[in-house]
Amino acid sequence: MPTKAKVVPRDYYDVTPALGHAAGDIWSGLPAYELLGGVTFTGIVITPACDLANRKVETISYLPVIPIKRYFATPAFLPDLLRRVRGQLIAAGIDHQLESPAPFVWPSLAEVDDLIAKTKARLSNADVKTLAAAERAEAGLSLLRAASQDSCCVPPPGVMACLLGDKEWASTLSSIVRNSFSPDIHFLPSDQQPVDWSGIPEPSVALFRYPLAAPIQVLDAAQDVAQADWPAVIGSLARAIPSARHLLKQRPLKHATLIPRYFADLLTRYIGMHVRLGSPDFSGDTVAAFVSELQKRLQ
C-alpha cells in the first residue's frame, strides 16, 4: 500500500533562490517602518508572480515574519492575553480594573505594576488553589509589563506556559502550527539552515494585518554584488526614492523562497481574510425578540 510522504520543514523552502524576484521570496533586512518595534524584519513577498516576472511593479509587497515567541507580545495577541489574565486575577480573588484604553492598546504601566504588587502579596498568603491562580496572573502581568514597554519583545522565559498551564500551552502551540489559532497569522517552520544564513531560524508566523512595501530598485541593488558600499547606494537612491533611507542600517538579503504549494496556502488564507463579506451582527435586543418569536411559533 502506498504511504504518504512525511512533510518536513526542508520541504517548505527552496534555500537556493533565483536572483530575480518571485512571490514567496523570504528576505531579511526589510524595513519595519517602526511597526511592532525594531528597525527591520524578515518578510515574505506577496507581490503577484506575473507582475514580478514582467517588471510591472515599482514596489515589492511583503508580510512581516516574526518568531512565534514574539507573537505573544504583540498587540495582535493582547485581547486574548487580557482575557486570560483577568480570569486568573478573579480566580485569585484579586480586585482589578484591567482594561485597555482602546482595542489593541496596552493597559497603563501603573495599573499593571499595582496588580503585580497585589499578586505578590497574595502569593505570600494563599491556599493551594488561589496560589496557582496568583502565580498564573503574575506571569501574565509580567508579559503585559514587558510588552507595553517594548512591542514585539521576547516574553520572559516560561511566562506563557505558566499563564496557560502545560496542557493549554501545548494545545495553543498545536493550533498555531495547524493554522487554526487565528485567521490573522500563518505558521512557517524553521528552514533548518545554518544560523548565519537562515532566513527563518526558528518557528515563526507571518502577520496578515501588517502588509508593507519597499521600493523594488532598492532590492535590485541589494542583490547586485558589485554594489559594495551600501550607504552610498542608499544615499544615491534616496534622492529619488526617499523611503530608501529606511533600508540604510541593514542591507536586505534574500535567503529562500517558499515552495509554491505552501505559498499558495499562505496566499489563500491571506486573501480569504480580506474577502469575507459578512454582515452586521444583530443587537442583543433583536436576538432576544427573534428567540421569543421562535419560542412562540415552535411551542
Image (tube, rainbow, N blue to C red):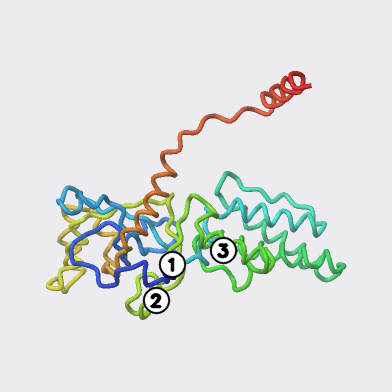
Callout 1: few (<14), some (14-19), or many (20+) C-alpha neighbours within 10 Å? Answer: few
Seen in the image, is 85 located left or right of residue 63?
Answer: right
Q: Residue furthest front?
A: 1
In the image, 295 versus 218, the foreground residue is 295
> Callout 2: helix, strand or loop?
loop
Amino acid on which disc 1 is placed = Lys
Against 88, residue 286 (above or below) is above
* Residue at left offset 47%, top offset 55%: 185
Q: Earlier in the sequence, mark 3 or mark 1?
A: 1
* Residue 256 drawn at (x, y percent): 30, 68
Callout 3: few (<14), some (14-19), or many (20+) C-alpha neighbours within 10 Å? Answer: few
> Callout 3: helix, strand or loop?
helix
Real-space Cα separation, disc 2 to disc 3, in angstroms: 20 Å
Q: Which mark is residue 174?
A: 3
Q: Quadrant of residue 13?
A: bottom left
Q: Earlier in the sequence, mark 2 or mark 3?
A: 3
Seen in the image, is 298 located left or right of residue 30?
Answer: right
Given this view, does label 1 or label 2 mark the residue nearer the observer? Answer: 1
Q: Residue beneath label 2, please?
A: 192
Q: Are marks 2 and 3 in contact (CB under 8 Å)?
A: no
In the image, 102 versus 132, the foreground residue is 132
* Residue 172 drawn at (x, y percent): 60, 61
Q: Residue beneath label 1, please?
A: 4
* Residue 66 drawn at (x, y percent): 44, 63
